[in-house]
């Protein structure tokens, strides 16, 4: 078994097109295996992330809508976390709420206060905590600040057919650009901490977004979850590991492919007692 720590950094609502103009993401791309044609399963977090953790489409697992977390068929579909836990990993999640990812297999499943918690210092502390454990670890870090501001300033103020929102194109673009810049600052700080703790040499790190967000491109979708255009379905994906040379994979890939890719990298065989995967 190729036993490595697994760190998953998820930028909730991170748009791929904004990452293309980012100096930070350009730097990450040069050091990673980047998937430039990565497609999410669903344009909202719950279905998108359950498919990542199960390697399967929500039409099979039961979690195929915004409110179907508790329909996840946990006895039929084994999660990435459960595989790692069975292989003696310590597993810890820091999430925005109880619904976004499957809980199965986590030693610690902590919900942060999206309105008040400062995530840079919080997640740096978590990295230092897991670094000092004797066993290998799986750490899931959920960056929620894009989502929170969009919720407060867009979802709670407008609706999918609010002409006022769609007419304010400059304001919408400026709001998202500011939020994405803050996400970049967060990500840079976390990656610097990983480097400082010398974790990169013994880890596989997945940097990803769950879905994108509308900034008013199409009337009828003021944030996400209504349509399936590129701005919500295409995501950014980077795998960082010292074991493999940097490269760009230009073929279309799916977020359901992440789980089997990580398991294969770690040389963990699939459990034939559970349903087969859709991802490869």
Image (cartoon, helix red, strand yellow):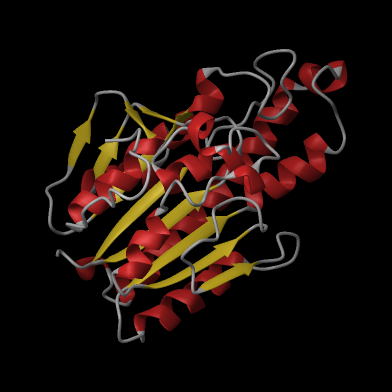
Q: Percent position (x, y) of residue 195?
A: 30, 69
Asked whether 106 or 240 is in front, the reply is 106
Task: List the single residue furthest toward the top.
Answer: 219
- Assign the C terminus to one quadrant of the image: top left
Residue displayed at 75% across by 15% down: 220
| Total number of numbered discs in the rendering | 0
7 in relation to 272, above or below? below
Q: Is residue 27 visible?
A: no
Q: Percent position (x, y) of residue 242?
A: 16, 59
Q: Quadrant of residue 212?
A: top right
140 in relation to 274, above or below? below
238 in relation to 214, above or below? below
Residue displayed at 44% across by 49% down: 53
- Residue 135 falls left or right of residue 15: left
- Assign the N terminus to one quadrant of the image: bottom left
Residue displayed at 34% across by 73% down: 89
Asked whether 86 or 24 is in front, the reply is 86
- Residue 183 falls left or right of residue 261: right
Q: Quadrant of residue 7?
A: bottom left
Asked whether 201 or 95 is in front, the reply is 95
Residue displayed at 65% across by 48% down: 70
Q: Percent position (x, y) of residue 94?
A: 56, 65
Q: Is residue 123 visible?
A: yes
- Residue 64 falls left or right of residue 221: left
Asked whether 215 or 160 is in front, the reply is 160
Q: Percent position (x, y) of residue 151?
A: 76, 42
- Residue 162 falls left or right of residue 265: right
């Amino acid at each position: 078994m190729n036993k490595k720590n697994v760190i998953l950094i998820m930028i909730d609502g991170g748009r791929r097109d904004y990452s293309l103009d980012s100096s930070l993401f350009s730097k990450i791309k040069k050091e990673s295996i980047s998937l430039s044609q990565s497609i999410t399963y669903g344009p909202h977090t719950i279905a998108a992330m359950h498919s990542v953790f199960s390697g399967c489409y929500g039409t099979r697992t039961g979690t195929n809508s915004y409110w179907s977390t508790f329909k996840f068929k946990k006895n039929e579909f084994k999660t990435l976390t459960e595989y790692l836990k069975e292989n003696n990993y310590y597993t810890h999640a820091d999430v925005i709420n109880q619904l976004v990812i499957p809980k199965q297999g986590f030693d610690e499943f902590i919900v942060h206060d999206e309105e008040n918690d400062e995530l840079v210092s919080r997640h740096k502390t978590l990295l230092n905590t897991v670094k000092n454990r004797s066993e290998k670890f799986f750490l899931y870090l959920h960056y929620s600040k894009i989502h929170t501001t969009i919720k407060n300033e867009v979802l709670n103020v407008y609706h999918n057919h609010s002409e006022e929102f769609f007419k304010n194109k400059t304001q919408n673009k400026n709001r998202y650009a500011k939020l994405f810049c803050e996400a970049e600052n967060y990500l840079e700080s976390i990656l610097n901490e990983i480097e400082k703790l010398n974790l990169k040499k013994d880890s596989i790190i997945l940097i990803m977004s769950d879905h994108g967000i509308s900034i008013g491109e199409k009337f009828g979708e003021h944030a996400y979850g209504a349509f399936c255009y590129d701005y919500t379905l295409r995501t950014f994906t980077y795998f960082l590991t010292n074991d493999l040379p940097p490269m760009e994979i230009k073929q279309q890939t799916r977020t359901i492919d992440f789980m089997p890719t990580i398991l294969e990298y770690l040389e963990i065989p699939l459990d034939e007692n559970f349903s087969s995967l859709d991802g490869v």
